[in-house]
Amino acid sequence: MDLFNPSEEHRMLREMVRDFTTDKVEPQAEAHDLSGSLNRPLFEALGELGLLGITIPAEGGGAGMDATAAVIVHEELSRSDPGFALAYLAHSMLFVNNFYHCSNDEQRARYMAPVISGEWVAGMGMTEPAVGTDVLGMACEARRDGDRYIINGRKTFITNGPDGHCFLVYAKVDGRITSFVVDRDCPGFSTTPKIPKMGMRASTMSELVFEDCEVPASYLLGEEGGGITHMMRNLEIERLTLAAMSLGIADRCCEIMLQYATERSAFGKPLTEFGQIQRLIAESYAATEAARALIYATAAKVAPGTRNRIGTDACKLFAAPVGKQVADNAMQVLGGYGYCQEYKVERLLRDAKLLEIGGGTLESHQKNLTRDLARRVQV
């Protein structure tokens, strides 16, 4: 079996997304990095291709594919524009995938069609100004008031915040983490101006602000206190697809540095004949292929009803530094050219750093993996 394209459908998906990335994503990547803006028409084109509901069953309006398909899309998009891929991830994984699996038919009827088509951009609100990795310490609160909930608090570093219409938001009800869907029609909800950032600039980021925000009781997802289950389940596919983004960055940087080192000569011979350059290229390739094998092997074991926190934590812990290191190696091979915008390496290096932080820091993965592996020994 082909681990990376396990079915003909997966192979066709990869070809489609790669062609789309080459023809549509690549030409606009530099401009939207410089402007720090999301390309909304291009985002809607993802909906036309059926990619915004990639993991949603066909009866729910989605493509009916699996975690491997989600990995393929994120890897291919990230070869050209990781920032745009991050906007896609926040929408399709953090909102669409999560929302579908914790919502009822009435809620799906209101939200699924516009988010799968791309008419509405969506996101997820979990991180808070004073609480990052320690999500259980969140301070955002919701209280029941008749046929509505009143939410107060702030969420920060929210991808798609400035562009989003709706968000899956976690807040505490009587001390228990609970999930809500909140949109711009809710009184008391607002977003701050976009937060400038080092990389991933083709996706926008802001705070979500809840000031006595009135949310209909029908916007409660699942039951009060059920948010922690929703959160933990969706973090697995989030970490897997973030790892896939790092893979896409590393793969593109390997390609760029090899092409450059083959064409460029110094002291009368190609760069590929210098031992220092050989080390950078060879180690980059080996690390990229190791990440690829781990990510796709894990993706085959991730599904809505199948938990695999150890595998997905391992993927992101290993793969996230690979993207950054390979991009850094590529810059070293290209020298001054790598430090300039022409070869795209400087942008990919800036983008890669976020993957060691977002969706769980490397330190959180080390903690989770050690704890979960220790439990295996105890059992």
Image (tube, rainbow, N blue to C red):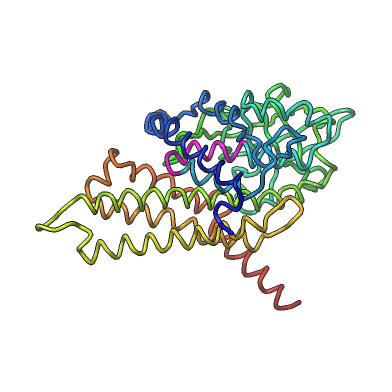
Residue at image location 82% in from the left, 27% down from the top: 216
Is 261 on the left-hand or right-hand side of 289? left
Looking at the image, the residue that sits furthest to the bottom is 378
Determine if the magenta segment contains residue 10. Answer: no
Tell me which secondary structure the magenta stretch mostly adopts.
Answer: helix
Q: Could you tell me how many numbered marks the image carries?
A: 0
Residue at x-position 47% and y-position 40%: 18
- Please tell me whether residue 96 is drawn above or below residue 313 in the rendered image: above
Q: Is residue 201 left or right of residue 278?
A: right
The image position of residue 98, as x and y in percent, is 71, 42
Looking at the picture, tell me which residue is in the foreground, 6 or 350: 6
Whether the magenta-drawn stretch holds residue 81 is answered as yes
Q: Quadrant of residue 187?
A: top right
Q: Residue at x 85, y 42 (%)?
A: 223
Q: Residue furthest left?
A: 268
Q: In this view, does 109 lie to the left or right of 259?
A: right
> Which quarter shows the C terminus?
bottom right
- Compared with 329, 64 (above or below) is above
Residue 299 horizontal/vertical position (percent): 62, 55
- Where 201 sits versus 299, above or below? above
* Residue 185 vs residue 97, the one in the foreground: 97
Image quarter for residue 2?
bottom right
Residue 66 percent coordinates (x, y): 66, 47
In the rendered image, the quadrant that contains the N terminus is: bottom right
Task: Please provide the residue range marked out in magenta.
Answer: 79-91
Point out the residue furthest to the right here.
146
Picture coordinates of residue 212, whole percent (x, y): 74, 29
- Comparing 11 with 133, the one in front is 11
